[in-house]
Image (tube, helix red, strand yellow):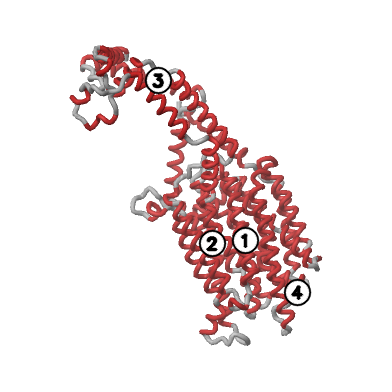
Amino acid sequence: MSIEVEHVIDHEDNLIAAVDELPNGNRRPMNAGDDDDDDLQKHDIVEDSPTPSNQSSSGSLDSLQMSRTKKHPLSASYREWVHNWAQISIPAIGFLGCQLSLALQNGFVTPELEELGISENLVAYCWLAPPITGTIVQPLIGITSDMMDPNVEGSMAHKYGRRRPFVALGCVMLVICLLLFSNARYIGLLFGDDGETSTANAAIVAVVSFWFLDISINVVQAPLRALVSDVIPSRFHTTANGVFGFANGFGAITGYALGYGIAYNEKLGGGLSALFAISAFIVICTSTLMLWLTKGEHLLPITSMSLSEIIAKNYAQDATQTDIEQQQLLHPLPPHEQQHSDVLESAPSPEPLPAAVQAPVVARVEEENEQENDDDENNAEEAGAAGQAPQLQRRDSEIEVVLQMQKSKCQRIKEALYTMPRPISRAFMVQFWLYFGLFSSYIYLTDWFGKKVTHGSPHSDDEAEVDAYHFGVRLASIGLSFGAVFAMIGSMLLPLVIGVCGYRWTWFFCMLFYGVMLLMTPFCNSINMGLVIVTCLGIGQAAAMVIGWSIVTETVAEGDQKGVYTTLFTTSHTVPELCVALIAGQLIKLFDNQVSAVLAVGGVAALFGANSALYIVEPKKWLAKQRWLKRQNRILRNRQNG
């Protein structure tokens, strides 16, 4: 190595000596713009070249001009902060349109089905198909998307990604079902209904379209949740799920507010056609934008979500650059050193070493590299095979992927159920009890407000009672809109609370508060109290969107089965939906046709969920323990192999 360095130094000394022999007025610095000239022209003497003093002053002026035009670190920090929040919000854009449609479904499906002649006892059974199909469809979608290999050229995953095709398919289905459900009355007229005494065909169209409407929402939601683990860095998953909760709240606010202003409006036809058509248009816009922004499904460049951290980083970089520029301005290089550096930058590369000299140098370099590798291996063995850990981990991961690809979908579901990480299984139980209350409110909250609070009836011959029922449904939409605001604010605050209190206690108090609010519904007789209850129920939606899913995405961030576990966790929603749909009708009969009985039972289930929240396992601690166990197993395996 020393022979090569001496060879380069001798070559540089010859260049400097040649430059020093030139008169001062005839020296010309070698610029990058001279590349277009011939090689001989690079060494020509130009009589009008600037003097060294002019070069020094012009260089100082250029540095000063660059320092003036450079962005201020505070402005750059705000730009970076806004850019990071925009990046982390991309998956939630598609979720926004989906949740708006879900809000309209929760607010208006039950009243519409009852107006089409379906009794309140049978309405619960109409909600059976969505959880059944959701339990089957969502795991299949998650497993299928996981098994798609984007590295295979010509495949759908290579062209469009693993998650985006399912999101696109679900959005198309969602738009069609929204339009079919809202126009069921008019479609029924085409098949022989008279619109007043006979609405059987319209009811069939409404029920079938409602089933596929819920299926399409599930088709969209599951890949979007898995997409968070794919494109968002793992340390920002809690924040990303908070943004999902914000999108859920904003979509619900928009849906319920539109429902209050447009539903049953005589100027717009008196039905739901205009309301659901607007929702379909919003779904098209949000899904198209999200699909366009997630091309390739690559990891998004997110540095930090904290403005103070970004400002500190940019000011530190700016201070370092400013010190360098100030040193250049205050202590410029002497003229001969500046010309020396200019000549060196444009000087041709040194001649290659002779073969007789090059062979020993190469041999020495290879010997040093081998010695360094031996030292690294010895250090890795002494430190617990730390140097081999990344390679072994990567090899084990590749083997695991190959083995998973060879298994059938049913085998992968069965194995995932048996090997489900403990943080996810514990969160599953809490989410299971929570969705008893949530699904009860989805089915009967607006119906409860119209019957219990405003004392109306959709089946009465008295127009005043029918109008009172419609008024109650619209007021419930306003209350749900307030609840969505509460959920949206809570979704943004919950990550901060989780950072201080942890998942366990945060979820415990949310479940306790939510259960108490549901238990108050049988005793509500005033509009003000009803609005307060409906608004406070938003805390349950915020907890469902943020806490449970943050635990899941944080736990599976380092694994290769994100789609399987996220879709299995979704069954914590569908199974309670199935149970509520089966028992709701019997509960209403048992309690003298009081729909508030179903809501109260949901409150009791929420209290069970509060108890289950006390057994939550923190993902960070669990992952740290798993990494320690893998490292110890690897050390033992290396020792056994000698």
Q: Could you say which disc has been placed on residue 371 in the image?
A: none
Label 1 – label 3 distance at C-alpha? 61 Å
Q: Earlier in the sequence, mark 1 or mark 2?
A: 2
Q: Position of residue 288 (x, y in %)?
A: 46, 59
Label 3 – label 2 distance at C-alpha? 55 Å
Give the quadrant of residue 624: top right
Q: Are marks 1 and 4 in contact (CB under 8 Å)?
A: no
* Viewer-nearest residue: 294 or 22: 22
Label 1 – label 4 distance at C-alpha? 29 Å
Label 1 – label 2 distance at C-alpha? 26 Å
- Would you say 147 lies left or right of 136 here? left
User: Is residue 232 shown above or below 72?
Assistant: below
Looking at the rendered structure, the kind of residue marked 2 is Ile
From the image, tell me which residue sits under label 3: 372
Nearer the observer: mark 3 or 2; the answer is 3
Crowd around label 4: few <14 · some 14–19 · many ≥20 (10 Å): some
Looking at the rendered structure, the secondary structure element under dot 3 is: helix
Q: Earlier in the sequence, mark 3 or mark 4?
A: 3
Looking at the rendered structure, the kind of residue marked 4 is Asn
Nearer the observer: mark 1 or 4; the answer is 1
Q: Position of residue 111 (x, y in %)?
A: 66, 74
Looking at the rendered structure, the kind of residue marked 1 is Ala
Q: Earlier in the sequence, mark 1 or mark 4?
A: 1
Q: From this viewpoint, is residue 151 visible?
A: yes
Q: Could you say which disc has been placed on residue 136 in the image?
A: 2
Nearer the observer: mark 1 or 2; the answer is 1
From the image, tell me which residue sits under label 4: 593
From the image, tell me which residue sits under label 1: 252
Q: Earlier in the sequence, mark 1 or mark 3?
A: 1
